[in-house]
Amino acid sequence: MGRVALVVRAVLFGILFIASLSLLPDREGNRCSMTYMFEMPKFRNLYQSIWPRLPYRQMGYGLYLYGEGHTVERDRDLQLSGIPVLYIPGNAGSEKQVRSLASVALRKAQTLQSPFHLDFFTIAYNEEFVALYGGVLERQTRFANACLHGLLSLYPNRPQSVVLVGHSMGGVVTRGLFALPGFDSSLVSVVISLATPQLAPVVMFDSLLRDYLEHVNAHWLQNAEQLRHVSILSVGGGHRDREVRSALTSLRHVDVYNNTVSVVTCAVPLTWQSPDHQAIVWCKELVLAIIRSLFDMVDDNRKQITNSAAKRMDILRHHFIRNPGVSYSHGLERNVEFPVSSVWVLKEKARWRFKKHKMSESLKGSVGTFYVFPILSKNYSHFYCRSNDMELVSWIYGCSTYKNDVCLKGEDLSGKAERIPGFKVSLLDLPSLASFTHVTIFVPKGVESKLLLECEFLNLDQRTLTLPAPSIFSLGFTSNEVSIVPGGLLFNFKLDGASKVYQAFKAHVERKCTSTTGEDLLRLHIPWSHEDSFMLGSPQEHTLMDIRFQTGRPPLWDATPTLHLHAFPHCSYRVTLQTSLVNVLGQIMRFHVENLPAYFVTSLLLAFGRQLSDLLSQGFCPDFHSAQTDASKPYKIQPFVVIFHLMASSEWFSALWIDFLPLPEPDSVLMERRSTWFNLLPLLLFLLADATLYWMATLCWGIVHVLATLLSKTWRFESYRSEQHRSTSSCLPVSIVLTAVAWTQCGALSLILLCIFSILKVAILKCKVTSLKAALSKTLGGPVQSRLVSEADGAGRTSENAESWKLRAKQCLDTDQSTLNLHSTATAATVCVTLFSLPSALHWFRQLHVERKLKPDPHFPVAILFCLMLPLLLQTSSTAIRSSMVLQATTTLHLLLPIITAVFSTVHLYRIPYFVVVSLIPLALARLF
């Protein structure tokens, strides 16, 4: 049975390793185009130019004005007249990240010879690790507020509003400004966030980060009416962003008055790429979309951002949701009178393809050719048309007055088209065209040689096929497929049963064509989120598309994801859908890696509880691997988590929980709301965490063995002395020193030092046990060795015979072995708590040159408790623990603590150290009582 468990744990650890590879950066480089500066950029420090002075200068904070080329001379005297844009960097971000946005805006203003320009200001936060430590968010927000008022004071004609652009956690700060007491929200009209975790922190290492974001979101919900004038754009990076998954960038939870746009870069028109977390600030395609939208928002009269919130939102939707292929400022005419003298061609076929033709001499004076299609609404539901000419502006019309084979009046329908990779497409619903008699397609003169134009009437229901999603338990060995005969331009495949974030598929598209053709196009449309992805068909007649969801389907939605195929009429297709096991594991890891540490600690506490139970009942503490194999069972956790989840989903329990218990909302309810929960999740996470703990314990035990070997060659230990004879007073200096470090420096630093001390203590105890085993082995194998006799003589036990000495040595060995096993697990728990505190320690070390004491310190209470408790525990033998009434009275706690940990701590990692503290306190008190 032990070998089977070992194999199972090895397989599970291999699965976890494969899944973890999905969190690593892709080997494939970013497909975004790089933005370049054509002249030397310069950042002017504005600290001396703003009065009153900006705060936190000693922290390395600063405000800079970007200049490039001739703008450096223009802004030398700070007589600013442009539109202010303030860029706020994110975690470990630099003020220099603004270069791409600022340079592209400068070139666009020069190219258009625009009467206005954008002034880009940028903040330096000394590259603080704000995503790892939430204690600086308030400080950064107050500094951004001071910068906002300071930069406005530089303008002789004070602008009415400022545009805020934030990257990563900088986007959180942009919205946090509005939650400051007394902040004037009219100072900001547009907020643009790039790869910002709006919904929740990526990983909550401390409560400060969670509290700040919850406060900001609550403020936006409570003051939605007062903040409806602010237009917000939140852009997620897609699958290549390994640091902030796109589900967290959505602002749906605060979008009360439709003043937000949440989109993923792969769905942004003219971008269609997925950059990584850093590349999103310089991805040229995305930067161009942002700058175009800002230029379109400028009021021509005031030369500032327009005051019309409705217009700003229309512009954002135009550039980031649905782009018809024309500029927003073009302005399509609703009513059109057609030039009668042009060429008019009537087409009464259901399907038509434009072919290059030679224009007659008598028609060379016309502007082009109009192709007229009578609306065939009897057997068809839609009119579909696509063109490869991206420069066409007005190209599709509805004809309301048709006379003498000429359309006299109509309406421009080009605004209903959509720009997708390689095409402009228009799918018109025929019932909505009841006021028209014909659809007219315009082909301008001079583009015939390169134009590809195809149109058809179709019944969309007949072109919509169901492609059931295979179960994830098929492991990719089974698949579902559909075949398409030649003759259509557009086909839809409804992925029935695909709605969960842990689902992932591979779509194989095979085509066979009767003639040479170009690239077809696959589009995955997600109806509940703006995260569509595109894939151009392969010339090798075989296309492979990964299907993964950025967000799960909301609970009240019943829409189904759809795969659109923009096909060629002379090609037959076969579409096959199969589960991608590797991507399924990657999705689970991507969405639930933050839940894994809770089950890791749960498995550790289960093993710890078994060790204590055996110590109290049998008098001997087993080693960690044996205790884990016996005690770490899924059925001890899974039923309680599922039952708790069912209870928490009910309204009466939620009301009772919120009104009477001072605890945050249950994590399973949060995951249910975010569509990331499934009933097998606790079981899967527990198995993966249990396997990880087993092999990590093996690795750590190997490290301890190496340290013990090195110590044995340096020091000589008295093998006959048991650990129970050690003095408690020897731990007091260690506790005092570590407490002083936590008080004056950083709680995480004291935990790190305590962890090192604990590992050394375990290594020393391991060395003693090894030495005693070696001595006892020699004694049992032959006559009593002279060294043991001399040790016994030195101890004043010359009257003891060899048999009594061996019996006493065995007792000492059993006691020290039990003590070693127990202290090893306590040290492992200390290592876990220390790992949770490392982010704040990293921030403290990074800012040590400007701030010696970490304020506020989220791990200070845990550090103080550990520093007072663990050194005392490490001086306690298993015999003393066994005889302690305190431990016997609290044995039930060690049985309930793992269940409580799994139920309450599946997301909020900062709670886990407190559960570990509670589990170790009885052991420390056992030494005192």
Image (tube, helix red, strand yellow):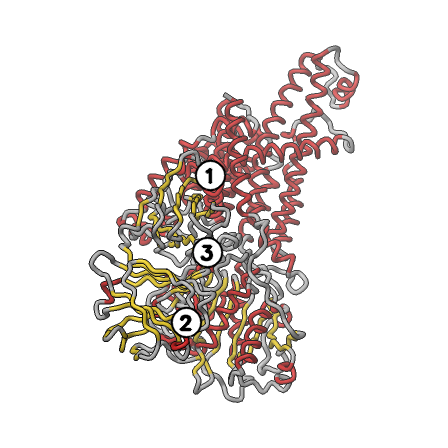
Q: Is residue 388 left or right of residue 486?
A: right
Which residue matches tag 2?
Answer: 359
Per the rendering, the mark at residue 103 is: none
Q: Of all residues shown, which one is farthest toward the front? A: 361
Q: Residue at x 50, y 55 (%)?
A: 244
Instruction: State the separation of the CA atoms marked 3 and 2.
Output: 52 Å
Kind of residue at badge 3: Ser
Q: Position of residue 239 (x, y in %)?
A: 49, 52
Residue 581 is labelled as: 1
Rendered residue at 41%/44% (across/down): 503
Q: Count residues near mark 1 (Cα–Cα under 10 Å), then give few for <14, some for 14-19, many for 20+.
A: many
Residue ID at (58%, 53%): 839
State the separation of the CA atoms marked 1 and 3: 21 Å
Q: Earlier in the sequence, mark 3 or mark 2?
A: 3
Sequence-wise, the earlier of marks 1 and 3 is: 3
* Residue 246 badge: 3
